[in-house]
């Protein structure tokens, strides 16, 4: 059916769009990470702004998004 596939596609897009570093810095400092440091929303730049905990939380969040996508693909594949 096309409707469940569309739902999964929209869900995957939404998970992929969640910028862990952006929201973490915004929540902790009320600043835009894209205007700080290198301008990147990645873990390294978040670490520059928030320190080790910011780096690790961003890395874990981004890793988890990728792991979730792989696990969902394995679960819902037709093997």
Image (cartoon, helix red, strand yellow):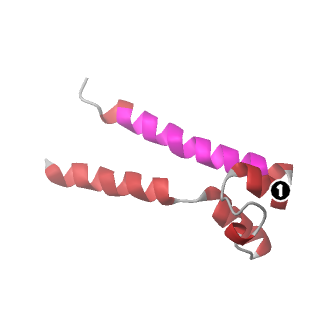
The residue segment tinted magenta is 55-73
Magenta stretch holds residue 21: no
Give the left or right position of residue 33, taking residue 77 as reference. Answer: right
Give the left or right position of residue 52, taking residue 57 as reference. Answer: right
Note whether 51 is above or below 73 in the view shown: below
Q: Residue at x 65, y 64 (%)?
A: 22
Residue at the right extreme?
51
Note whether 22 is above or below 45 in the view shown: below
Image quarter for residue 39? bottom right
Q: Residue at x 23, y 49 (%)?
A: 5
Magenta stretch holds residue 65: yes
Residue 49: where, in percent of width, then height?
A: 82, 61
Image quarter for residue 3? bottom left
Residue at the top extreme?
79
Q: Which residue is label 1 attached to?
A: 48
Residue 34: where, in percent of width, then height?
A: 68, 68
Dominant secondary structure (helix, strand or loop) of the stretch shown in magenta: helix
Residue 8: where, in percent of width, then height?
A: 31, 50
Residue at the left extreme?
1
């Amino acid at each position: 059916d096309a409707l469940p596939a569309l739902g999964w596609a929209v869900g995957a897009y939404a998970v992929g769009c969640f910028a862990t570093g952006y929201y973490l810095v915004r929540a902790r400092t009320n600043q835009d990470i894209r205007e700080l440091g290198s301008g990147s929303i990645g873990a390294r730049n978040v670490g520059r702004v928030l320190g080790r905990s910011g780096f690790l939380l961003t890395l874990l969040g981004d890793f988890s998004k990728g792991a979730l996508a792989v696990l969902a693909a394995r679960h819902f594949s037709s093997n």
